[in-house]
Image: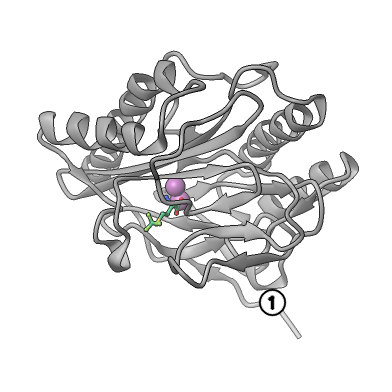
Amino acid sequence: MLPFKRTIPLYLKEDERNGLRAASRFNAELMDYLRPHVKAGITTDELDRMAYDYTIDHGHTPACIGYHGYPKTICTSVNEVVCHGIPNAKPLREGDIVNVDITTIVDGWYGDQSETFLIGNVHAAAKRLVQTTFDSLFVGIRACRPGCAVIEIGQAIQTFAQAAGYSIVREYQGHGIGRQFHQDPGIPHFASFTSSRDILEPGTCFTIEPMLNVGGWKTRLDKRDGWTVRTLDGSLSAQFEHTILMTESGPEILTLTKNGPQEGHHF
Ligand code: MF3
Ligand code: CO
Ligand code: CO
């Protein structure tokens, strides 16, 4: 069987693109604001409070609080936590890796991004995982162009990550984004058949947010809090995320930060 193409009905006009650009820029500024504080000794609750206050003080809206009942402003995923870790009162410790995932709403438009931070000196194995995950995000971004199929992103990331010996989380993926937090198309970070017919035309906005594990790809959802996703085998996991607008001339990264790691960064 195959292939009838499915163009995602998401053609954003220039003023709409500018709405997304502004939301993503604010989100990136918030990441720049938090970055110097992501250090040993701070609690993820403190980071969460800073993100909440910064967002409100600028007249914008945190996207996560109340989203399907999520209780906080940001997600903080430490070590074996894959994603959706809930900030808590435990201080970050030297040797941890922590992903900080931030989403804000500016004038009705969503901007979404995450970074994994190394807390002090971390094991070489953890640093290599973080480096490969960061690089895999850019491998995915560089694999897409106007009119490409979504699967090309996942194929490129899968080839790259597996060559480095890591597995790729399958149950959580990137997503279309705009006036909604999560919408079509889903963006798998592996070569999923389901994404082979989805075509990324100019005017489509979406996230790429690969999660790579040292061990197996399977995850387990915390039954008590209903949110925290951990690797099933307890191995380390890292993630990076950008919001991407497909334009007529190629992918535009909307959530680039001023002070954060740029493409090609060496951790
Ligand atoms: N920011 C996450 C993403 O990249 C989603 C978090 S939803 C929450 O899609 F409710 F857990 F905050
Ligand atoms: Co996202
Ligand atoms: Co996110």
Give x and y (percent) for residue 150. Answer: 62, 58
Give x and y (percent) for residue 29. Answer: 32, 24
Q: In this view, does 35 lie to the left or right of 160?
A: left
Q: In this view, does 13 lie above or below 256?
A: below
The amino acid sitting under disc 1 is Pro
The residue depicted at 39 percent of the width and 45 percent of the height is 87
The residue depicted at 26 percent of the width and 35 percent of the height is 49
Residue 250 in view: no
Quadrant of image for the C terminus: top right
Q: In this view, does 167 lie above or below 67?
A: above
Classify residue 247 by image quadrant: top left
Q: Is residue 101 above or below residue 108?
A: above
Residue 112 in view: yes
The residue depicted at 35 percent of the width and 32 percent of the height is 47
Q: Which of 137 and 30 is in front in this view?
A: 30
Give x and y (percent) for residue 40. Answer: 51, 22
Determine the secondary structure under disc 1. loop
Q: Nearer the viewer, residue 154 or 57?
A: 57
* Residue found farthest to the bottom: 1
Q: What residue does disc 1 label?
A: 3
Looking at the rendering, the quadrant in which ligand 1 lies is bottom left
